[in-house]
């Protein structure tokens, strides 16, 4: 079966032969298969490593120069972490390593052995979204969605760091995450909302 | 049931976007995919005389090195929104620094990158024209202005004579820089050939355009090209045309016989898919002593590439033709060719740059006349479009001025520059008018009403983050009486019924009427089935109502599942179409922009501290996603006013700040709380729902509102964007 056609059952079997709607790819993360590419040519530089990503073991064979971002996107099939600049300037690739936010484009995968990596795919508890994810939807804190995983990973870290004391503080501590669609107002709304909910519970 | 259209429904694709599940072009798991990397020229003009590929070809995992010497020959590009004729490795000529000169394919991304950097090219350099300002005397008339639909010049009355005779005048030159769209998702394409058929997953604002352009270039029927793009990580115009990287990916995939993936680097985004060209605009305004405009002259020049790459003329003067009532108006557009990539549409093309000049000049005129800037605009209010000589389909601009000014507190403004302070910090208040054309183009849609009452619908349109998935779901929910949860609207696949590219704020007005018509057709078929049933004796379709999968009639009900089972159908399908724009009216949206800036008098630091925008954009289909578009456009405008400029090294013609560290875009602390107002109104002329696109409108007028506020704060008139610290330090 071609990738992206796995949901044809949703639409109805007679429709599936009619082209059009039947062929539209709409792949959810659960259905996303890890690419079955032929193994790259093995060279002496390559090393076998094991990462811990979202609580699961992830064995990889990579060259030492491969960034954590490329390892996640191109080898592990975890494409929720985005590449916006590959230079540490935009924040789209933000993930947590041992609970701290880092730019995965500036982090070598090989340096992450033995450390806990969390990506956007690992934030929700099953079907239950993380409060920041839910707040982003409620406040429409994105448009195109491409910077969104990085914004959310930065925002959850910011809350843990205790930097959501005011709108000005939120803006300052989110300054490393660019949103070109300009959803900043709504992102601040979402973070403030989660911070005040947490304060209310506390 | 209350109407779903208009409600602030959460984005239906929201969950996929916050969980990392929304797949963008580079993220489809195509089995066996290998990686391509582009190589760019390091000179601005000349010819490639030698290409040494030996080192690259010998590196591990390298599958192909494609250069002009071994590239597949392509047909001429005739399709798409904008004809982009080069560079697709068809010859050895170099016309700008950063031109694609090779594509390297390897089994992993890092190996492709390493091999790309090992390529050795030798050039014979020619003298290059690297900046527009050094070549203004070579300005020429565009050959295909607005696709050849009209002249680049227009005249109403005699602007020069009226200017010469007038009492109060402004005569100034305004400049806007090269800007790059910089969507967060760099352009990406995966291409896979199956015989003479190709599937491309590509980041595009127009799947139909991509389908036809690729078909033309590769000499295959459009039906052999399938374009898939369910999510776009921002476009802002740079994904509107089918640029060479998509073509080169397909070429590479054919060459290596495997699927190939290409993602542009951020640096490559600066020379691969257009930009907003630099403009130099001379504006003359003249008024009588009462503030009534008697003459407007707007002579605009915009930067172009060398002509053989295509043509793009920034239409800076179009808003000038219609924004104010004035008997004498002259507009011209000229181009200045330099050794640069081909420019293109960028959010609010024409208006963003042109209205900066016009609305800065209006502020200068208000100062010269000692009339309040809002009052000056009201004295010159255009009740109809004096250029097209047509009525507006809807114009509530007066209300935008009134509601915007009230929300901002404009009446408290002291007009004297440097008169308002907070401690030592200077405060400035400025305003400007916004306008953008409302557009509609032919589109088609298909709807299937299923036995369980759910609906699947689709159109070959796009969702750039603008909310297409969500608002079309709302339209269907209302038309077919179902909960939005039971609707699945699909887009971004060229096998769906065709729709126009998403650019120029066209999508809502084009696609929603087609979706409505498709729903009506499905409902009509359903009602016909029921009326043919003996149990429906005595009923007419006027008695029937569809709600939640049941057709209700007086004293009778017909569950969809039973109707379909009896007819032996799995679903009922309806198709609908939208035609092109209606004639007879001038179609424009409007707005009023109000900005407060705070300027440090010693350091010159300029911050936007408060913002109000009031917009007349017809009926808003979703207040939540609609507000996101408004704050997004205003934020883009803040970047234009204070931050954004692509700088060219005059010696080499190379962009020196081609990354997100030095090409500054607004970040969180640059953007204050933005107040947005939708002025009530519906535009029934443009489409049956009364809606208009709002992607560009909120960006127009932001830069002049801020520039006018900076003048009010400091007394310094900045006519050259972006406004910098050194401009106001004097």
Image: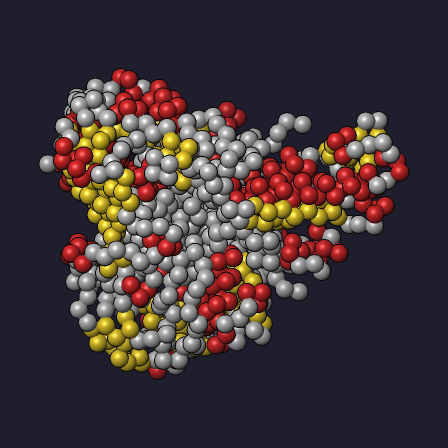
For the N terminus of chain A, which image quadrant? bottom right
Residue B415 image position (x, y, % from top left): 20, 21
Instruction: Single out the residue that lies furthest toward the right.
Output: B534
- Identify which residue is drawn at 31% across, 39% down: B321
- Identify which residue is drawn at 50% across, 24% down: A200
- Identify which residue is drawn at 65% across, 48% down: B575
Q: Closest to the observer: B640 or B261?
A: B640
Residue B596 image position (x, y, % from top left): 28, 28
Query: Relative to B480, is B709 on the left or the right?
Result: left
Whether residue B409 is situated above or below residue B662 in the rendered picture: above
Query: Relative to B217, is B671 on the left or the right?
Result: left
- Identify which residue is drawn at 37% across, 73% down: B89
Residue A194 image position (x, y, % from top left): 49, 32
Q: State which quadrant residue B430 falls in.
A: top left
Q: Closest to the observer: B533 or A62?
A: B533
Q: Closest to the observer: B373 or A32?
A: B373
């Amino acid at each position: 079966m071609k990738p992206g056609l796995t949901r044809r059952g949703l639409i109805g079997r007679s429709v599936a032969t009619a082209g059009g709607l039947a062929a539209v790819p709409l792949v959810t993360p659960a259905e996303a298969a890890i690419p079955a590419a032929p193994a790259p040519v093995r060279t002496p530089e390559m090393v076998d490593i094991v990462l811990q990503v979202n609580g699961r073991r992830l064995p990889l064979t990579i060259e030492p120069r491969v960034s954590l971002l490329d390892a996640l996107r191109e080898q592990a099939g975890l494409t929720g972490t985005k590449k916006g600049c590959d230079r540490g300037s935009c924040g789209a690739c933000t993930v947590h390593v041992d609970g701290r936010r880092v730019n995965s484009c500036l982090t070598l995968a090989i340096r992450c052995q033995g450390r806990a990596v969390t990506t956007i795919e690992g934030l929700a508890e099953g079907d239950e979204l993380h409060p920041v994810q839910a707040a982003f939807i409620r406040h429409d804190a994105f448009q195109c969605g491409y910077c969104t995983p990085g914004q959310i990973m930065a925002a959850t870290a910011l809350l843990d760091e205790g930097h959501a004391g005011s709108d000005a503080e939120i803006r300052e501590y989110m300054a490393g995450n660019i949103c070109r669609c300009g959803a900043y107002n709504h992102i601040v709304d979402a973070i403030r909302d989660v911070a005040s909910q947490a304060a209310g519970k506390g | 049931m209350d109407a779903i259209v208009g409600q602030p429904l959460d984005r239906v694709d929201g969950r996929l976007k916050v969980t990392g599940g929304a797949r963008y072009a580079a993220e489809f798991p195509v089995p066996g995919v290998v990686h391509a990397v582009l190589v760019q020229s390091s000179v601005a003009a000349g010819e490639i005389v030698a290409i040494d590929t030996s080192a690259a070809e010998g590196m591990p995992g390298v599958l192909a090195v494609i250069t002009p010497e071994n590239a597949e020959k392509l047909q001429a590009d005739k399709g798409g929104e904008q004809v982009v004729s080069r560079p697709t490795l068809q010859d050895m000529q170099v016309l700008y620094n950063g031109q694609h000169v090779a594509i390297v394919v390897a089994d992993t991304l890092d190996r492709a990158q390493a091999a790309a950097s090992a390529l050795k090219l030798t050039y014979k350099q020619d003298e290059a024209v690297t900046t527009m300002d050094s070549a203004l005397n070579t300005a020429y008339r565009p050959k295909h202005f607005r696709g050849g639909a009209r002249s680049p010049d227009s005249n109403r009355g005699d602007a020069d004579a009226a200017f010469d005779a007038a009492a109060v005048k402004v005569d100034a030159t305004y400049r806007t820089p090269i800007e790059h769209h910089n969507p967060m998702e760099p352009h990406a394409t995966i291409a896979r050939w199956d015989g003479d058929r190709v599937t491309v997953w590509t980041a595009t604002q127009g799947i139909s355009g991509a389908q036809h352009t690729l078909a033309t270039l590769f000499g295959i029927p459009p039906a052999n090209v399938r374009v898939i793009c369910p999510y776009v990580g921002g476009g802002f115009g740079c994904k509107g045309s089918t640029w060479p990287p998509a073509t080169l990916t397909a070429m590479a995939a054919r060459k290596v016989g495997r699927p190939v993936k290409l993602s542009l680097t951020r640096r490559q985004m600066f020379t691969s898919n257009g930009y907003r060209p630099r403009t130099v605009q001379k504006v003359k305004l003249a008024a009588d002593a009462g503030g009534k405009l008697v003459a407007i002259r707007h002579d605009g020049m915009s930067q172009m590439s060398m002509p053989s790459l295509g043509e793009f003329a920034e239409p800076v003067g179009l808003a000038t033709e219609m924004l104010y009532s004035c008997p004498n108006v002259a507009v011209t557009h000229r181009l200045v060719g330099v050794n640069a990539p081909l420019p293109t549409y960028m959010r609010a093309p024409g208006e963003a740059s042109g209205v900066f000049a016009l609305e800065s000049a209006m502020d200068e005129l208000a100062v010269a006349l000692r009339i309040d800037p809002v009052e000056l605009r009201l004295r010159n209010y255009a009740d109809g479009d004096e250029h097209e000589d047509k009525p507006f389909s809807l114009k509530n601009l007066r209300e935008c001025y009134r509601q915007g000014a009230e929300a901002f507190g404009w009446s408290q403004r002291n007009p004297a520059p440097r008169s308002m302070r907070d401690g030592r910090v200077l405060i400035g208040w400025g305003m400007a008018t916004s306008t953008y054309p409302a557009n509609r183009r032919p589109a088609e849609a298909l709807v299937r009403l299923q036995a369980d009452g759910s609906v699947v619908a689709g159109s070959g349109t796009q969702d750039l983050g603008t909310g297409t998935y969500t608002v079309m779901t709302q339209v269907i929910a209302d038309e077919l009486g179902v909960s939005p949860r039971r609707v699945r609207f699909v887009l971004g696949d060229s096998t769906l019924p065709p729709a126009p590219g998403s650019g120029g704020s066209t999508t809502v007005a084009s696609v929603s009427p087609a979706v409505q018509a498709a729903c009506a057709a499905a409902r009509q078929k359903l009602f016909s089935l029921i009326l043919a049933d003996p149990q429906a004796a005595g009923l007419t379709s006027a008695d029937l109502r569809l709600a939640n999968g049941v057709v209700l009639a007086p004293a009778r009900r017909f569950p969809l599942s039973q109707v379909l089972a009896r007819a032996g159908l799995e679903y009922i399908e309806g198709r609908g179409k939208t035609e092109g724009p209606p004639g007879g009216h001038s179609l424009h949206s409007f707005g009023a922009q109000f900005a407060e800036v705070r300027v440090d008098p010693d350091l010159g630091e300029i911050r936007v501290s408060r913002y109000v925008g009031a917009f007349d954009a017809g009926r808003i289909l979703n207040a939540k996603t609609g507000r996101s578009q408004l704050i997004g456009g205003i934020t883009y405008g803040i970047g234009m006013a204070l931050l954004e400029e692509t700088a060219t090294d005059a010696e080499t013609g190379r962009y020196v700040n081609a990354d997100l560290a030095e090409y500054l875009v607004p970040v969180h602390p640059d953007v204050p709380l933005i107040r947005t107002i939708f002025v009530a109104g519906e535009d029934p002329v443009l489409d049956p729902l009364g809606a208009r696109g709002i992607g560009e409108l909120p960006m127009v007028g932001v830069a002049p509102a801020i520039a006018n506020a900076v003048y009010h704060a400091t007394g310094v008139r900045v006519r050259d964007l972006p406004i910098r610290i050194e401009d106001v330090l004097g």
